[in-house]
Image (cartoon, rainbow, N blue to C red):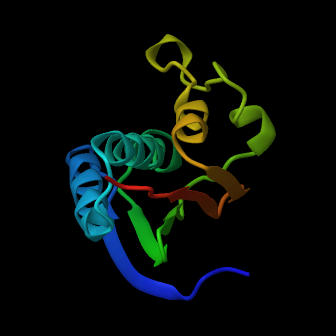
Amino acid sequence: MREKKTNEMKLILQSRSQNEGVARIAVSGFLSSLDPTIEEINDIKTAVSEAVTNCIVHAYEESVGTIYITCQMYGKTVHIKIRDTGCGIEDVEKAMTPLYTTKGDERSGLGFAVMESFMDGLRVKSIPGKGTTVYMKKTIFGK
């Protein structure tokens, strides 16, 4: 049984490259009350950065859209949801394969692999033409 929700933050950003840093700082600030280690906070910031960058680069491509970020604490476990209403992903399983990219040589195709390696859980749901939601979770053991 999941613990009771102890705190929550919601953030809405435009899909502009400068907002990737805003998302990282906001999420890390929100988590500061859990007293995470530097490694834990860096892991989460990196995963958030990858998810937000995916929204900017892939979801809205040549336009500006909206990125919705929700962070919820359940005791020492944080759940992070990053959602867009962009183009969506046709084949999520294929998109999550390391080195797969639709952007040629300009992208490495490692975004989902990085998120998965730094978080305790990762799920991706997408509907073509409607958007994508990335769900991540991590337990903070702290200092």
Q: Nearer the viewer, residue 114 or 85?
A: 114
Q: Nearer the viewer, residue 123 or 127?
A: 123
Q: Nearer the viewer, residue 60 or 99?
A: 99
| Residue depicted at x 22% and y 63% | 29
From the viewer's perspective, is residue 68 above or below residue 132? Answer: below
Q: In this orientation, does residue 23 appear?
A: yes
Q: Is residue 2 left or right of residue 37?
A: right
| Residue depicted at x 48% and y 76% | 75
Q: Position of residue 70 (x, y in %)?
A: 44, 72
From the viewer's perspective, is residue 40 above or below residue 128? Answer: above
Q: Position of residue 21 (x, y in %)?
A: 22, 47
Instruction: Name the quadrant of the N terminus.
Output: bottom right
Q: Position of residue 97 (x, y in %)?
A: 72, 28
Outermost residue on the top side: it is 105
| Residue depicted at x 46% and y 75% | 73
Q: How many marks?
A: 0
| Residue depicted at x 45% and y 44% | 47
Quarter assignment of residue 34: bottom left
Q: Position of residue 116 (x, y in %)?
A: 61, 40
Q: In this orientation, does residue 91 appear?
A: no
Q: Nearer the viewer, residue 110 or 95?
A: 110
Q: Is residue 96 left or right of residue 20?
A: right
From the viewer's perspective, is residue 116 above or below residue 88? Answer: above
Q: Is residue 20 left or right of residue 78?
A: left
